[in-house]
Image (cartoon, rainbow, N blue to C red):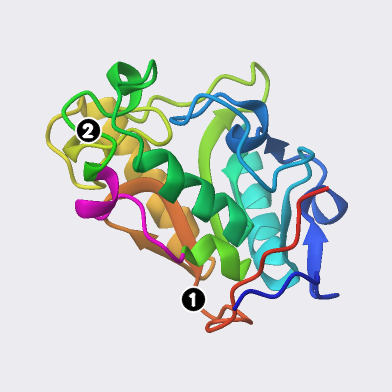
Amino acid sequence: MSDITRPELFTNILDVEPSISVDLKYFTGDNFVGSRVSGYESGTCWITKPTAIALQRVQHELSEFGLGLKIFDAYRPQRAVDHFIGWCEVAEPCATQKRFFPDLNRSDLFKKGYLVKQSSHSRGSTVDLTIIDRESGAELEMGTEFDYFGPESWFDSQLIRPEARANRMLLQRVMEQNGFVPFQQEWWHFTLQDEPYPKRYFDFVIE
């Protein structure tokens, strides 16, 4: 059972650190599904306050080098996860396969563990992000884009160029030093170690 009420401990990341760039892919439709995902009715980046404060520390550290964070996803309603489940049950090919999962079928995304039926994102303290150049807004080279489902996205992948591996190491280091735990299979995915809701999953709409 997911909680449809947003707790007061959630905040808009831009209210805590307005210099962070936000590009919620499941709101814009620029994602592996190819359209806006259920529960994303605005591009507001909701996250628990302790996570927002930790991300603020990361942003300030990176800013000393002219760098900053760009967030692709943060809190994710359970209904969005359910949307993924339904989408993966459709048999026919899709236009996004070549871009995001060229070596897999839709049904493989759950079988291989790239998607799960209860996401840590729905607890409010997991974030998907990358590093950008603050002046140009360009994303640093990470070897794959966000939500690429394949071994190239693993943190320690040797299938990518040295520059991308170095950038991943920078991202992992700065996030770990500020209290985040990485996910081995997705270079962009981090969860606050001391998350306030480790066993609660939420389903309030992003608006």
Can residue 177 be seen in the rendering of this structure? Answer: no
Q: Which residue is mark 1?
A: 193
Label 2, residues with CA under 10 Å away: few <14, some 14-19, many ≥20: some
Find out whether the residues at labels 2 and 1 contact each other: C-beta distance under 8 Å. no
Look at label 2 and name its amino acid.
Asn
Q: Nearer the viewer, residue 18 or 177?
A: 18
Mark 2, secondary structure of its residue: loop
Confirm whether the magenta stretch covers residue 179. no
Alpha carbon distance from label 2 to label 1: 33 Å
Q: Quadrant of residue 24?
A: top right
Residue range of the region highlighted in magenta in the rendering? 109-118
Label 1, residues with CA under 10 Å away: few <14, some 14-19, many ≥20: some
Q: Residue placed at 43% from the left, 34% from the top?
A: 146
Q: Quadrant of residue 69?
A: top right
Residue 76's x, y, as percent? Answer: 61, 55
What secondary structure do most residues of the magenta stretch adopt?
loop
